[in-house]
């Protein structure tokens, strides 16, 4: 069986991720209720822990990936003004007349 | 589009970004690629149970697939996870982060139009070029690392499935006996169509059938599977340094997709019964 660590740790981290994703009303979300449900599931506890750990990995990786995307890939192209500014130039003002 | 009652004015289609890909249509545009981002247009996300399974409601509208089918999933837990994806979106909906939704859409629409046999064949074909079976001879440190990290998981697969797999340093890859392939074919046949979509997805992400089966059989965690899949990259990173905007970006994306695929497979292939605790008062 996979080395998962303490179930409580996984559960706490999972709830933290859900809180991060949902904002203030995370306690009302179906995901929170599902995680903290009082229903008894007829399934091996190890399987459940593995599922929780997998979901935790999903939430955490999506958040980290999004942060990296915002940081490095989300800014689009620089404008001509910004490009000129990189080397200390300024673009000329309206060129004198056309044609 | 995705909702039942389309608004009167057609919303402008955003240009497809680099993220995501799909089969190219006859006019050259990507026929099955939704826009990469658009504004969040709903307040509340909830799930409900319909005839075909569990449905996702965005306000009063029912979620639909890119091919305009009603979005229904067989598992309540999966529906909740999908609903959570939609609810986690802030000002803009970032489709490229919604891996479970994408997997459900693929299962419902089947855009590549493959049947169960074709999916299984595609999955088992990967064994011939399985990452953990392809070994280098140089540099010795990497060859050693591959031996130490990959040999155990190959041995596990051989024992678990009672097959011969082996590994190879030849450019042609390992020679997989037909009986081994047959064993995996019949094992995969025991999964339903939805789970198979998930399995095939995980295999294409990890570039390894053995790592995928190891993950699905809960022998290793997602993080470990991704590490083993990226073993050479990790070796080079340790040697030459890490580049956050490339290495970490790819790592997080691979982890997210693999985790989503694994969760998807498990949620689509489980059969759990729910017993309500009797209230004692």
Image (cartoon, coloured by chain):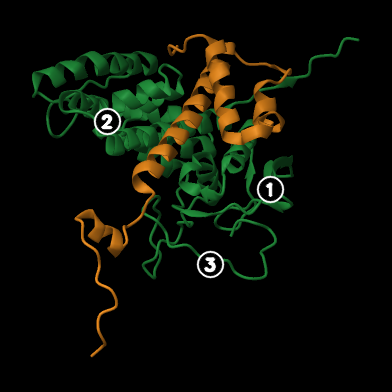
Mark 1 vs mark 2, CA separation in Å? 45 Å
Colour in which the image shows chain B: green
Element carrying mark 2: loop
Which residue does the image show at 57% across and 17% down from the upper left? A12
Q: Which one is nearer the viewer's eye here, B76 or B34?
A: B34
Residue behind mark 2: B130
**What letter labels the chain drawn in orange?**
A
Q: Find out whether the residues at labels 3 and 2 contact each other: C-beta distance under 8 Å.
A: no
Q: Is residue B60 above or below residue A41?
A: below
Q: Which mark is residue B43?
A: 1
What chain is tagged by disc 1?
A: B
Element carrying mark 3: loop
Mark 3 vs mark 2, CA separation in Å? 43 Å
- Left/right placement of residue B275 relative to residue B153 reads right
Mark 1 residue crowding within 10 angstroms, few (<14) / some (14–19) / many (20+): few
Lower position in the chain sequence, tag 3 or tag 1: 3
Q: Position of residue A72 (x, y in %)?
A: 34, 43
Q: Position of residue B173 (x, y in %)?
A: 18, 31
What chain is tagged by disc 3?
A: B
Which residue does the image show at 49% across and 40% down from the upper left? B99
């Amino acid at each position: 069986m996979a080395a998962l660590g303490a179930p409580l740790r996984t559960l706490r981290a999972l709830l933290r991720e859900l809180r991060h994703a949902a904002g203030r009303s995370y306690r009302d979300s179906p995901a929170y209720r599902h995680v903290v449900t009082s229903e008894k599931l007829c399934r091996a506890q190890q399987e459940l822990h593995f599922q929780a750990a997998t979901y935790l990995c999903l939430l955490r990786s999506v958040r980290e990936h999004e942060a990296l995307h915002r940081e490095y890939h989300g800014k689009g192209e620089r404008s001509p003004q910004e490009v000129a500014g990189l080397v200390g130039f300024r673009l000329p003002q309206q060129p004198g007349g056309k044609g | 589009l995705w909702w039942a009652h389309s608004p009167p004015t057609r919303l402008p289609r955003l240009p497809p970004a680099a993220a995501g890909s799909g089969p190219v249509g006859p006019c050259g545009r990507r026929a099955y690629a939704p826009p990469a981002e658009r504004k969040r247009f709903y307040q509340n996300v909830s799930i409900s149970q319909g005839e075909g399974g569990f449905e996702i409601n965005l306000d009063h509208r029912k979620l639909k697939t890119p091919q305009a089918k009603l979005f229904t999933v067989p598992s309540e837990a999966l529906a909740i996870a999908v609903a959570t994806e939609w609810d986690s979106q802030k000002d803009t909906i970032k489709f490229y982060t919604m891996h479970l939704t994408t997997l459900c859409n693929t299962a419902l629409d089947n855009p590549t139009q493959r049947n169960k046999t074709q999916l299984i064949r595609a999955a088992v074909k990967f064994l011939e070029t399985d990452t953990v079976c392809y070994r280098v001879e140089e540099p010795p440190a990497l060859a050693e690392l591959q031996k130490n990290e990959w040999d155990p998981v190959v041995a596990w697969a051989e024992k678990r499935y009672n097959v011969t797999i082996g590994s190879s340093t030849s450019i042609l890859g390992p020679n997989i006996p037909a009986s081994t392939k047959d064993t995996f074919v019949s094992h995969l046949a025991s999964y339903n169509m939805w789970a198979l979509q998930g399995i095939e997805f995980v295999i294409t992400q990890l570039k390894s059938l053995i790592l995928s089966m190891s993950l699905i059989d809960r022998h290793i965690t997602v993080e470990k599977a991704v590490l083993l899949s990226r073993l050479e990259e990790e070796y080079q990173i340790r040697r030459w340094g890490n580049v956050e905007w490339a290495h970490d970006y790819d790592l997080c994306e691979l982890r997210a997709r693999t985790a989503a695929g694994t969760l998807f497979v498990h949620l689509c292939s489980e059969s759990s019964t729910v017993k309500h605790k009797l209230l004692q008062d």
